[in-house]
Amino acid sequence: MKKIIILVIATVFTLISCKNEKGKKEIKGTDKQEVTYLSFGGKINPDQAISKTEMAAKYKNLKEGDTLVVKFASSINEVCKKKGCWMKLDLDADQEAMVRFKDYGFFMPLNSDGREVIVNGKAYVSTTSVEELRHLAKDAGKTEEEISKITEPKYTLAFEADGVLMKE
């Protein structure tokens, strides 16, 4: 009888602890101070992420057609205000990376501007057409006047993320 009672108590505690863990999407950083992240897309960890300055240097060596698998940390300059389906990450004073999400498989919160993130995926460079630039401007909530001023394609530092960690 004692064994059954102990087994029932152990099962109840196990179920309670599993229920509390089920909905969490947090990863604790392994830095000196404890950092909590919200996770989007595929599971990644914050270890070995390079800085935005190091990433900017890597982009300088890429040509169209090149792809680099990398993980880097930066802050969000802007996120799509319609769905959260893209974001622009700060690289340095005058550069940013245009980030889209693998297979359109996940989105970022619409109010993520200014948040610190770590992205994992593929870096590449491309030329973005006027049509695509206007579409992105519309998604960002730009005015018709601002959109009509887009008349030339743009060389883009692009990134396809398969996973993102955002500091809480």
Image (cartoon, rainbow, N blue to C red):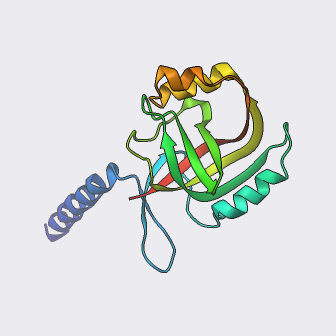
Q: Quadrant of residue 160?
A: top right
Q: How many marks?
A: 0
- Measuring 65% from the left and 52% from the top, which residue is drawn there? 94
| Above or below for 113 versus 133 | below
Q: Residue at x 35, y 53 (%)?
A: 24
On screen, residue 31 above or below 111: below
Question: Residue 150, image x and y in percent?
Answer: 63, 25
Quadrant containing the N terminus is: bottom left
Residue at 56%, 28% (x, y): give it: 136
* Image side of residue 152 versus residue 38, left or right: right
Q: Quadrant of residue 44?
A: bottom right
Looking at the image, residue 30 lies above or below residue 40:
below
Left or right of residue 34: residue 162 = right
Considering depth in this image, is 139 or 101 the residue closer to the camera? Answer: 139
Measured as percent of width and height from the top left, residue 60 is found at 81, 53
Viewer-nearest residue: 21 or 72:
72
Query: Looking at the image, which residue is at 45% across and 41% down?
Result: 108
160 sits to left or right of 37: right
Q: Position of residue 85 (x, y in %)?
A: 51, 33
Could you tell whether 40 is left or right of 69 in the image? Answer: left
Screen quadrant of the C terminus:
bottom left
Q: 149 or 103: which is nearer to us? A: 149
Residue 68: x and y in percent read: 78, 49
